[in-house]
Amino acid sequence: MKQITATGQNVNEAVESALAQLKTTKDRTEILIIDEGKKGIFGIFGSRPAIVQVTVKADPIEEAKIFLVNVSEQMGVSVKVDITKEGKNVLFNLSGEKIALLIGKRGQTLNSLQYLTQLVINRYHEQYLNVTVDAEDYRKRRNDTLIQLAGRLAIKAVKTGQNVALEPMPSYERKVIHTALVDNKKVKTFSDGSEPHRHIVITPVK
Amino acid sequence: MKQLIETIVKPLVDHPEDVQVNVVEEDFRVTYQLSVNKNDMGKVIGKQGRVAKAIRTVVYAAGTSQQKKIFLEINE
């Protein structure tokens, strides 16, 4: 983060001088007045210049992008990041070679990266932002797999008349399964266990 | 690898200058000892170790190309 202190005959002049040096505008900075300054008698005796400290505010989305690019690079993967912002949701779409390394088994590396990026972005941002990190359409493919899985296991539950427990999943993946089976009148779904072992149970309706 | 850990941890903490990574290499394992400022401990561990777990997942994924097994310890 860039920060400088500037002086001027009054606060306004000091701020303007700082902004000129930083080549930025007032709305992208935070201004701290250290000394308001004094005019003094005849502008000579006892006069003090105004001192302000101006800090350039970091753009959270830009910071998060830099974070993702740096981390991927250190992992030996060069990625391209596309950003889409929709209200409070920010989507980072990664693409490049060797992207499989960033996704990991059942997307666990991708989910971890997503969680860490969310932490980075919300350190800089006042309003809470929701981060999704996707790589080469992984999330969509995973959704399709989950919906298929849900259908298959629902049939199994009805056939055997017993509860079917799934493996632990993150909340948004569980949501996909709940939603997929909400119209199915033969089964009910609920979540059991506590994070990070929370998992779905599909139970047949008698 | 050491750099990767620093790249991940530094943006998460309040005192990036106190982030340190020591490497202990043995025959079949490499242990990375991460130490951060006392006040930042909570930030790198997180609620029920969520952050620590996420950092480990990313670090271990990066380490799959190496022969040795990797461990990440977090100290004060």
Image (cartoon, rainbow, N blue to C red):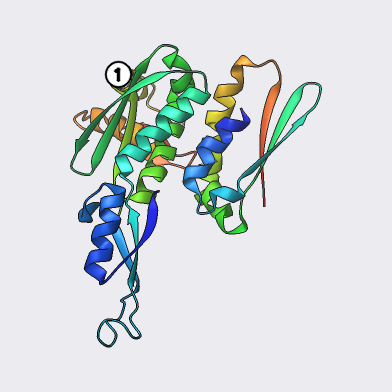
Residue at image location 24% in from the left, 39% down from the top: A89
Q: Considering only vertical position in the picture, is A67 above or below A33?
A: above
Q: Position of residue B20 (x, y in %)?
A: 65, 43
Name the one closer to the observer, B15 or A195: B15
Determine which quarter of the picture holds residue A171. top left
Q: Position of residue A111 (x, y in %)?
A: 42, 31
Horizontal relation, residue B75 to residue A112: left or right: right
Q: Considering only vertical position in the picture, is A20 above or below A109?
A: below
Name the one closer to the observer, B76 or A38: A38
Give the residue at mark 1: A137
Residue at image location 27% in from the left, 32% down from the top: A91
Q: Residue furthest top?
A: A97
Horizontal relation, residue A4 to residue A181: left or right: right
Chain hosting mark 1: A
SS of the residue at dot 1?
Answer: loop
Name the one closer to the observer, A23 or B64: A23
The answer to whether residue A196 is seen in the rendering is: yes
